[in-house]
Image: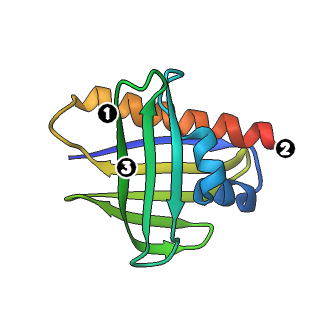
Amino acid sequence: MKISVETTVAAPIEQVWRAYTTPEHIKQWNTASEDWHTTAASVDLRVGGAFCSRMEAKDGSMGFDFAGTYTRIVEHELIEYSFGDRTAQVEFADSPEGVRVRVTFDSETTFSTEQQQQGWQAILNNFARYVEAMR
């Protein structure tokens, strides 16, 4: 099953794209809640290139790597990637209000659809707040 989340970022596409694809920026916004953070990120932004974000609870109780491989990239428009046996697509589209960012991903079985949607939406909301504060 596919799940989609989206937001609109009031910033130029170049700034939105750079914040989404640069490790130093990713470490600043890539979290679903205040008690987690991204301690490391790597990006090889090309088809066949790998990415990895190390996400950890701030209290040190747990952590995991969110990692995968880029399968399609259209600069300022689209990023597709696989992670494990799942895939995701990130679309970037200019609108009068800014850049609409939509993430569509394959669901998994550990967490409910609602929990997955809420978590990915929270991360995307943090992304929008971070980019808009950069201006």
* Residue contact at pointers 3 and 2, CB within 8 angstroms: no
Label 2 amino acid? Arg
Q: Which part of the image, by quadrant, shows the C terminus?
A: top right
Query: Residue 78's x, y, as percent?
Result: 51, 66
- Answer yes or no: do the residues labelled 1 and 3 have beta carbons within 8 Å? no
Residue occupied by mark 3: 66
Q: Residue at x 49, y 30 (%)?
A: 122
Q: Measure the alpha-carbon separation of dots 1 and 2.
A: 30 Å
Going by the numbered disc 3, the residue's amino acid type is: Phe
Between disc 1 and disc 3, the foreground one is 3
Seen at 38% across and 44% down, the residue is: 4
Q: Residue at x 49, y 25 (%)?
A: 58
Which residue lies under the disc numbered 1?
116
Residue marked by disc 2 = 135
Q: Nearer the viewer, residue 95 or 44?
A: 44
Which percent across, then down, holds residue 33?
A: 49, 24
Q: Position of residue 14 (x, y in %)?
A: 73, 62
Q: Residue 46: which numbered mark, if any? A: none
Asked if 63 appears above or below 90 in the picture, the reply is: above
Counting residues from the N terminus, which is met first, the one under dot 1 or under dot 2?
1
Looking at the rendering, which quadrant does residue 3 occupy?
top left
Residue kind at label 1, given as amino acid type: Gln
